Image (cartoon, helix red, strand yellow):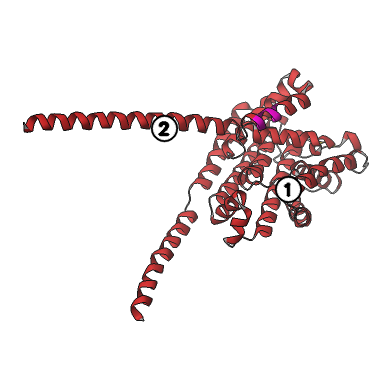
Amino acid sequence: MTEPAASASGAVQPVVAAERVAHQVRRRDPVPVSAFVCIAVVGSIALSVMNGSYLGLQVTTGVGYAVVTVGMVLQLGYSRQLAFSQSVFMGVGAYGTAILETKYNFNSAESLLAVIALATVVSLLVGSVVTRAPGLALALATLLLPLFIYELATFSTYLGSFAGISGVLPFWNGATYEQELVRSGIVSVVLLGLATGLILRVMRSGIGLQLMAMAEDERLGESLGVSLRQRRLEVFVLGSVLAAVGGAILASAQGLVTPDVLSESAEITLLIMVFVPGRKSVTATIIGAIVIEYLTTSTSFISTNLSTIEGVVLILVLIVEPDGVAGAVARLLGRRTDRWAAGLRAAAAKARARGGGSRAGDAV
């Protein structure tokens, strides 16, 4: 009886040791910290070089959208949670910042923290209801939220109706407008770095593995002990809070909040920023959000026909390449890598054949 027990314990020990090693590797994972440092440093240098120009304003606005789309990568791309309420929570962040600063004399740091707390509470309340619905029902339930909230904002005098709320403070004051824009942009880039590091940390952890299992097969994930309802709610809350932070960045950069920030058109723009670059790539969505924001504000043809162009582009991407540009590039590189590997194997086989023939000749 003691020998089987000893063998069983011996079999369990390597498994436990492997789990400890994997846990230590995850804790020491340098990728999230490296991503934060890279985004903060490169973004700060780029905005400093732009020196408060209109391009700097476009980039800072794109950074605000990028914070939202980073959360959408976890929701739509990684865990496949079909929630389309990001524009609503982006409006919560933007309007919350504007109201607290213009009506209650909050400073920018206080309003940002208050908005994060408000978005957490609201997303917990909303998410505890909507995340109980399956995929398509969740999509339909959240798809109607932007329409309802947009109508509410346009008819509310407290929210400024169609004119919105002006006079939103920058994140960091300066002697001139250009200096304020540069400083606020640097704060926005740091927030983007923190959001990116957080999302990468989740995706590369044990929770990320559970979300991946849920995305592939919810029954399989549940059979492995994954709490589906808890994970769905956590993903919804995290994505909603990041959307609110992105809205606060937009309000700070533009100094103005209008109902357009939480409309269905804003939600479609966010979907374009996620699906065109690649819904599974954090790097692609960050670049895509900034580039798409630049294109939509610097080209008169695109800005005039934005709704039509966005609808056509989104349909084409979903039909032709659901994984976006990043997926197409990865597939292309994979094919070329396979060809190179096949060529190397063929060359190695020929070399071995020649070597075998020469050795046979020497033996004769």
Res 244 label = none
Residue at the far left: name it. 364
| Mark toward the start of the polypeptide (1 vs 2) | 1
Q: Nearer the viewer, residue 55 or 288?
A: 288
Question: In this image, 41 relative to 150: left or right?
Answer: left
Asked if the stretch drawn in magenta spans residue 292, the answer is: no
363 displayed left or right of 7? left
In the picture of the structure, the residue carrying the numbered disc 2 is 338
Name which residue type carries label 2.
Asp
Left or right for 173, reference 102 = left
* Image vertical order of residue 195 relative to residue 265, above or below: below
SS category of the residue bearing label 2: helix
User: Which region of the structure is painted magenta?
Assistant: 313-319
Residue under pointer 1: 112
Q: Secondary structure at mark 1?
A: helix
Q: Residues within 10 Å of mark 2 (few under 14, many from 20)?
A: few
Kind of residue at badge 1: Leu
